[in-house]
Image: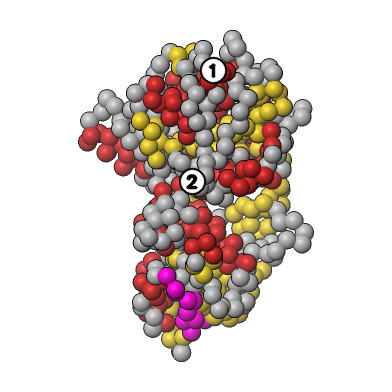
Amino acid sequence: MKRFSFVGIAAFSIAALTLASCGGPDSSDVSEGFDLPVIDTESFTTYVKTLSGDDFLGRKPFTKGDTLTVNYIADEFQKIGLEPGNGDSYFQEVPMVEITSAPGSSLVFNKGGKELRLGYLDDYVIGSPRTDAQINISETALVFAGFGIVAPEYQWDDYAGLDANGKTVVVMVGDPGFYDDGLFKGDTMTYYGRWTYKFEEAARQGATGVLIIHDTDAASYGWNVVRTGWTGPQLALETPDGASLPAAFEGWITTEAADRLFELAGHTDLIARAKKPGFKPVPIDVTTGVSIANDVRKSTSNNVLGKVSGSKYPDEYLIYTAHWDHLGVGEPVDGDSIYNGAIDNASGIAALFELAKAFKSLETPPERSILFLAVTAEEQGLLGSAYYASHPVYPLGKTVANINIDALSPIGRTSDIAVIGLGHSDMDDYVMQAAERQGRTVVAGGNPSAGSFFRSDHFNFAKVGVPALYTGSGSNVTGKDSAEVAHLRDAFAKRYHHVSDEYDETWDASGMIEDIQIVFAVGYTLSRERTFPKWKTGSEFKAVGEERF
């Protein structure tokens, strides 16, 4: 789950591009340059309008919208002339489990005859990731475990001395660097700050339950996003037999609810204490009970794959990704219950189609193969890309790089380009050379303090060592005054995970078109080289990247 942050991908309106050697790019194969394809705005926006139309029912996996969407994408890949990407099929089945949890209408905390009663949705959300039909926890003691982090490399252990078995841990979102630049990576969130890590670590510690305290600034999204995303059917990859189980229940509480909880416990200084090194977990002498009914359904969704085979090195692959899913039909807002996902991420799938057409139209075809991978269940935790990364159709050692497209900006052209996760790999250098030759700048994109690098599908490729590029919208919008830009940014940001994320007359697709051109340029350059991009010294992915060869 990412957040709209329209601060960083480039304006790129040239007819030709030459990339010289510097860092990653190999000039021996590309010094003659190449013409950029014409990307048709009407074609692109038609794809966006179609995919984000009500007919696709919000494109949620395990629904009718799933079937409609994957068949539409496969049909378009075939019309464009792409070969099936998985043997003779355009599909890769992704086995998942859908769990619809029905908790009680309130969550009650008890201490010494006093109780605190929280309201479902307004104060808390909760569910169970287990496939049991009924979860009954009659009583579990609460422990505040700071950020819920065990990070030896940062000399940080929020579980030090704690036996979490049978207990419910209450933890903060984010990591200590958000509050102190001298800790962890400062205002650049590490994976330890992500909600996924919090749940994983609590399970490793043997906790019965885990509650994350929501904070809008630290999370970078409001309670409405949690409320929408954590209610109704939840998807997960099927757990293999013998694998360790997640905690019996997982959930979130609001900041205000946490304040009331700590007041009940008589520990009103815990949040401040937890932000400092040396913090140890604190039992707060409060208990709760949880009863959850689970409706469990096992089925498959699909990644959709199409390819252009390389003319010289067909066994080497560059992979473009975009997720096709969104939130489906949910809680009505002003009478509208379809979460259409035009920006997020009909724009990315439309970009895949345009890129595919561009590669198919080349007079000089790519020497390496190009795989176009539309992945499922990004909104449920990057599940489709996680499945591909653990079950790759093509060997990871032969995978050159990943270029991910997620939530293109409808604000218009920009004079700069942002790389989310700038400094990790040689992929930066390809973008830098293109920007430098056209007089543009490259900046670090996204919201580092919100962990933007960990919040889209490229992250699963990075985790298995494949250099991955994820670009964001630019900060310097051209052709519009500052007041208009500020208004548009605010308006589009409010559409994130909202029924209002639809295509309308306020969209300016010019920047999107130019964004597609620049990721084409990077990909085509890589397709004509013999080198493989590498992770840079200091990146946490360097070691695993070297292991894949």
Q: Please name whichever residue, 133 or 35, is drawn nearer the observer in this view of the structure.
A: 35
User: Which corner quadrant of the image does residue 127 belong to?
Assistant: bottom right
Number of marks present in the image shown: 2
Q: Is residue 462 magenta?
A: no
Name the spot of residue 243 as percent of width and height, x first. Answer: 73, 61
The amino acid type found where label 1 is placed reads Val
Q: Is residue 139 above or below residue 77?
A: below
Labels 1 and 2: the sequence-earlier one: 1
Question: Does 498 sit left or right of 51 as displayed?
Answer: left
Residue at the image point whose x is 64% and y is 42% from the top: 546
Residue at the image point whose x is 68% and y is 28% from the top: 316
Cβ–Cβ under 8 Å for marks 1 and 2: no
Name the spot of residue 116 as percent of width and height, x first. Answer: 43, 78
Range of residues picked out in magenta? 277-288
Residue at the image point whose x is 29% and y is 27% from the top: 478
Residue at the image point whose x is 49% and y is 67% from the top: 156
Q: Nearer the viewer, mark 1 or mark 2?
A: 1
Element at badge 2? helix
Name the spot of residue 264 as percent of width and height, x first. Answer: 40, 81
Q: Which mark is residue 30?
A: 1
The amino acid type found where label 2 is placed reads Phe
Query: Which residue bears the numbered disc 2?
Result: 453
Name the spot of residue 453 as percent of width and height, x first. Answer: 48, 46
